[in-house]
Amino acid sequence: MASQTQPAILLRGGTLLIHDDDNHVIPTHDDLLIEGSTIAKIGKDIQPPSGAKVIDCTGKIGSPGFISTHHHLFQTQLKGRHANHTLVPYLAPGSFIASLYTLEDTFWGELSGALEAIDAGTTTVVDHTCVNNSPDYSRTAVQALITSGLRCIYCYCPPRTVSNWSPFTFGDDFQCSWMMENFKTLAAQGPYGNGRVEIGFAHDGGFLPPEALISLHETVRAAPAKLITSHAVGGAMRGYAPSAIQALDKHGVLGPDYVLSHADFPKEGDAEKLAKSGASVSTTTNTELQMGWPPVALEAEFYDHASLGIDCHSWGSASIVTQMNQLLQWKRCDRGKELDKEGKWGRSVGPSVEQVFNLGTIGGAKAVGIPDQIGKLKAGMKADILIFDGTSPAMLAAAEEDPVAAIVLHSSVRDIGSVIVDGVIRKEGGKMLDIIVADAFEEQQEVVKPGTSLSWKDVVQGVLESRTSLDGKVKNIDMRDAEEKIITGFHFNREGMVDYND
C-alpha cells in the first residue's frame, strides 16, 4: 500500500535536466533533495536527512513532470472506439455519451484516466470534463482526481445534454438551474487534495449573445475559477467563420487565465490577440493530425503562447512525449514541403527537440499560470519529477549523448521508472503504486468507500465493468443519425464536406 505522505526523498547520482535563465536545458550531474511537496536543494553530494528515502539514480535521467493543458480524463472506457473517426463521428459516442454516464462510470473513468496520465509522466492536467450531469457527478470526479495523486485543474463544463437519442436531440445546457451554483460552491471550497486539485471552467460558448458571454465570464472569474478553457476549431469545416480567439477577444473576455485547445486554422491577427491578452493555446498533436488540422504550437508566432495536451486518450496515446515527437516531426516535414514549393531545401532540420520538450514542461506551466511552481527542476518549486531509465534498450547511448533527445525521440512510457507528484511517489519500479480513496465531500453519494485501498487490478475491474454497462446502453443507438444532426446543429459546412467512405 502506498502512503499518502512521504519522508524526505534524495535522488542521488543521476543526470538532472535543469533549465537556465534562458530556458535552455542543461544536463547536470547533481543530487536533488525533496522535503514535503517541494524541491529543497539541488547540488553535489547532498547528505540525506534522517529517515530519508534515497533513490540511486545512476544511469537515470531526472526530468520535470509533463503538463497536459487539454485532456478529457473521463473517457477511458471509450478507448479503441475512435481510431478512424474525425470530429463528427466522434462527438456522439465520445462526448455526448457523457450524458449516459453513471456516478460509477464517472469515478472509474476519471480515476483511470488520471492514473494513465501519471504512468505516462504527466504530473499536471487541465481536465476539460463533460460529466457534470448533477452536483454529485462533479463531486465524484473531483474525488477521483484527489484519489489519483495527480495535480489537476478540473475545468467544470456546463452539462452536455441529450434530451433524446432517437431522433438525436442535444445541446450544452448553459441555463441549467443548479449548474452555476454548484460550480461556485466547488470553486469556493477548493483547492482540494493538499492544493493539488483546483477548479476551473470549460465551455464552448463563444456563440452566446454578447451580454450572456460577458456575464458568464464575470460569474466564473468571481467564483473564482483557476483557469478558463474552450475548444477552438476552425477552417473549412466551420465555413471559415471567425475564430474562437476573435470571438472572445471581440467581447473583451480573453485573459491570461485562458487556454484555447487546438486553435487550428488561425485567422490573421490571432497570435497578436493571444500575446496581448496573455492567453495560451494547447496543441494536442495526435488529435490535430487525425483530424487533418495543422498544429500551431511550433509556429513562430504562437510558440511563446503554446503548450501541449492529450485531448482524447480514447483514440491515442496519453503520453506527452508522443505529442512532442509527433509535433516535431510533422513540423520538420511541413517545413520541407513548404521549402520545396519554393524550389528550395533545408540544410538544417528546423525546430529542435529542446523546443518541443519545453512546450511540454515550461510552456504548460506558463499556460496554467504557475510557472514559478511547476515545469522546472529548481529549488523551491513543486517536486513533480520523472525518473527515466537511461540504460533501457530504447534509451541506451542516447541518454549519454543527449538526454533531451533520448526522451523526445527514443523513450516510451516503459522507460519512466518513477513518477513523483507533489513530493509523493506515485510510480516506482515501472509500476503504479496502490492508492487510497479520498474522503472528499461530506454530502456525496459514494461509489467506493473512502479509505479503501485500490490496486491497479481493482481499477481495471471497475473500468471494464463500466465499459460493459455503457456498451449495453449504446448498442441500439443510430450513431449515423446522430452525426447528421451534429453536422446541422454545429453549423458545419456540409457543402464542403468530403467523405472518403462514400
Image (tube, grey):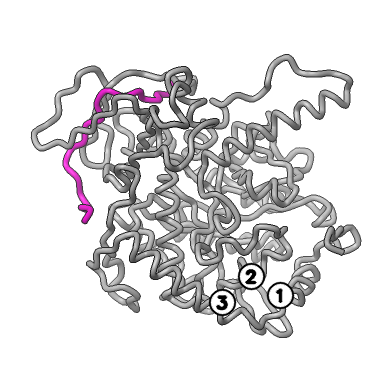
- Report the Cα–Cα distance between label 2 and label 1: 7 Å
Q: Tag 2: residue type?
A: Pro
- Report the Cα–Cα distance between label 1 and label 3: 13 Å
Q: Quadrant of the N terminus?
A: bottom left
| Mark positioned earlier in the residue sequence (1 or 3) | 3
Q: Provide the residue span drawn in magenta.
A: 1-20
Q: Residues within 10 Å of mark 2 (few under 14, many from 20)?
A: some
Which residue sits at x=59%, y=45%? 282
In screen coordinates, is 412 left or right of 209? left
CB within 8 Å, label 1 to label 3: no
Q: Is residue 252 above or below residue 373?
A: below
Residue highlighted by disc 3:
471
Residue mark closest to the camera, 1 vs 3: 3
Q: Residues within 10 Å of mark 1 (few under 14, many from 20)?
A: some
Q: Tag 3: residue type?
A: Asp
Residue highlighted by disc 1:
479
| Mark positioned earlier in the residue sequence (2 or 3) | 2
In screen coordinates, is 135 left or right of 229? left
Which residue sits at x=71%, y=75%? 479
Which residue sits at x=45%, y=70%? 464
CB within 8 Å, label 2 to label 1: yes
Residue highlighted by disc 2:
93
Q: Is residue 148 magenta?
A: no
Q: Secondary structure at mark 2?
A: helix
Q: Residue furthest front?
A: 393
Q: Residue furthest right?
A: 495
Q: Secondary structure at mark 1?
A: helix
Which residue sits at x=84%, y=58%? 500
